[in-house]
Amino acid sequence: MKNRLSKTILVFFALGLISFAFCVQQAQAAQINGAITFAGGVTLDTDSVNTATEVTSWVDATVQSGSGSFAGLDNMAVAFTPTWFFNSGPIVAFWSVGGFTFDLIASSVFQRFGDGFLLVTGTGTITGNGLEPSFGTWFFSVQDDPANDVFSWSGGTEAIPDGGATVALLGLSLAGIEGIRRKLMRSKS
């Protein structure tokens, strides 16, 4: 009778452990998601995008559209770092708007079109508004007159996979079940 009672308790313990593993989620803030686009004017270090290597100033940069976490930021002014080399390493607080900050990891010229069009791409980390930091990729484009050095910046975030807490909890549950199974096998002997 006592042996049967201990087996019942162990079975309920095992079921509780499995339930715990499947129901507990890692406590974390939500990820930043969505896309954001900016537009405005820039001053370049040369008269043509075909030879330019940097932005020396930003003029009237605003959010043109935003989705996901960036929804509702339309028409807000964007603060960019004062100067930026197209082929750049890290820049802390490259831009900020609406409680979000983008830290540049790297950027490089993606393509120069001979007819006065430049495309730069880059990566970085977006933080803000109580959300988890998220990795983002973006494109910057600018062209010669008659566009009067108008630029376009578009970027989005990418999902970051679970850090493994779910797999760890599942592994602990399976180890617990194996331990209970061994204990039951020993008690039968």
Image (spheres, grey):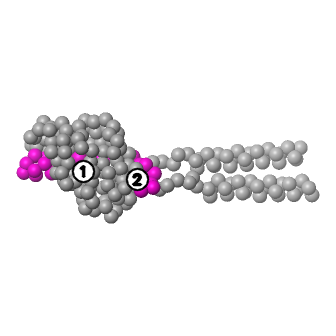
Select label 2 or label 1 by which is in front.
2
Residue 105 located within the stretch drawn in magenta: no
Q: Is residue 177 visible?
A: yes
- The residue drawn where x is 52% and y is 53% is 28
Q: Which residues are magenta?
A: 129-150
Q: Main secondary structure of the magenta part?
A: strand
Residue 128: which disc? 2
Find residue 51 and report its horizontal and vertical position in percent: 12, 36
Of residue 84 and residue 20, the one placed in the foreground of this image is: 84
Which disc is residue 62 wearing? none
Q: Quadrant of residue 12?
A: bottom right
Q: For mark 2, give the secondary structure.
A: strand
The three-letter amino acid code for the residue at tag 1 is Trp
Residue labelled with disc 1: 153
Q: In the image, what residue occupies the spot 80% across and 54% down?
A: 10
Q: Nearer the viewer, residue 38 or 159?
A: 38
Q: Position of residue 126 (x, y in %)?
A: 38, 49
Say which element carries label 1: strand
Residue density around tag 1, few if under 14, some if 14–19, many if 20 or more, within 10 Å:
many
